[in-house]
């Protein structure tokens, strides 16, 4: 079991940003009821996969400029509530990458539900591997969580193109609003590999990375 402070430290190390910055986002989520709370000592909060997913969402989805900290809860809820898009998604191949949990999600699940499920599954031992006819290949960068703004959009994908197995599978889940209004010509896109998912899963098991 891990504390909020340990979650902040692990997230900061995995993403390569300062602990102070991550702690500010965590504090905003806690104040808005988007992170588990507790008292001190034996009653201190224990973080969950849900908490880790919310913190990852708000850090990756916050805009490049503006009052990002004050908007943390709104950003988390806006991106976390995005629903899977049937037209852009094909999740059946995720089990070939060792990620059965993603293939088992209901069709209209949210982005937050997907990240929580993924982190929880990593804590239970699910790990991303590239299918190969000889033996699975470790290549964390070929698993990608992508978050785009300012128009809320997200994607979870696995790319098996470097493997030697038959078919070279691909898998993808896309999350978008039903209608995406034009908000201007400046976009930001942030990418996270499976290394961060694995670090957060290890944290939840009490095995700090």
Image: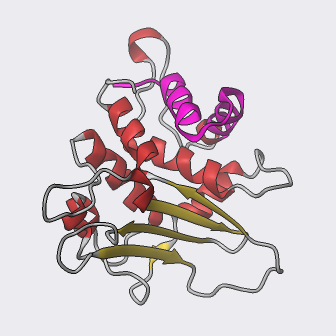
Please name whichever residue, 91 or 165, is drawn nearer the observer in this view of the structure.
165
Q: Examine the residues drawn in magenta and state their main secondary structure.
A: helix
Residue 161, x across and y down, in percent: 34, 72
Residue 5, x across and y down, in percent: 54, 23
- Is residue 166 highlighted in magenta? no
Residue at 46% x, 61% y is 144
Left-right relation of 127 to 156: left
The N terminus lies in which quarter of the figure? Answer: top left
- Is residue 16 highlighted in magenta? yes
Left-right relation of 129 to 16: left
Q: Quadrant of residue 180?
A: bottom right
Residue 196, x across and y down, in percent: 46, 44
Q: Tell how many labels.
A: 0
Residue at 49% x, 13% y is 40
Colouring chosen for the image of the structure: secondary structure
Q: Which residue is most to the right?
A: 66
As drawn, 19 above or below 192: above
Q: Which residues lie in the magenta part?
A: 1-28
Q: Which residue is most to the left?
A: 134
Residue at 69% x, 74% y is 151
The C terminus lies in which quarter of the figure? Answer: top left
Residue at 41% x, 37% y is 199
């Amino acid at each position: 079991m891990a504390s909020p402070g340990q979650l902040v430290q692990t997230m900061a190390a995995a993403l390569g940003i300062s602990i102070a910055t991550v702690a500010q986002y965590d504090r905003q989520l806690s104040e808005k009821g988007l992170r588990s709370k507790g008292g001190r000592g034996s009653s201190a909060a224990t973080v969950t996969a849900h908490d880790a997913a919310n913190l990852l969402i708000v850090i990756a989805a916050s805009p490049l400029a503006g009052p990002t900290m004050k908007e943390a809860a709104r950003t988390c809820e806006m991106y976390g509530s995005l629903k899977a898009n049937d037209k852009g998604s094909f999740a059946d191949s995720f089990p070939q990458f060792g990620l059965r949990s993603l293939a088992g999600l209901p069709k209209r699940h949210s982005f937050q539900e997907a990240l929580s499920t993924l982190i929880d599954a990593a804590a239970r031992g699910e790990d991303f591997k590239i299918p190969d006819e000889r033996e699975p290949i470790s290549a964390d960068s070929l698993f990608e969580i992508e978050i785009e703004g300012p128009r809320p959009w997200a994607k979870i994908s696995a790319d098996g193109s470097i493997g030697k197995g038959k078919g070279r599978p691909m898998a993808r889940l896309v999350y978008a609003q039903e209608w995406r209004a034009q908000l201007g010509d400046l976009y930001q896109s942030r990418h996270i590999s499976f290394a961060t998912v694995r670090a957060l899963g290890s944290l939840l098991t009490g095995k700090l990375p």
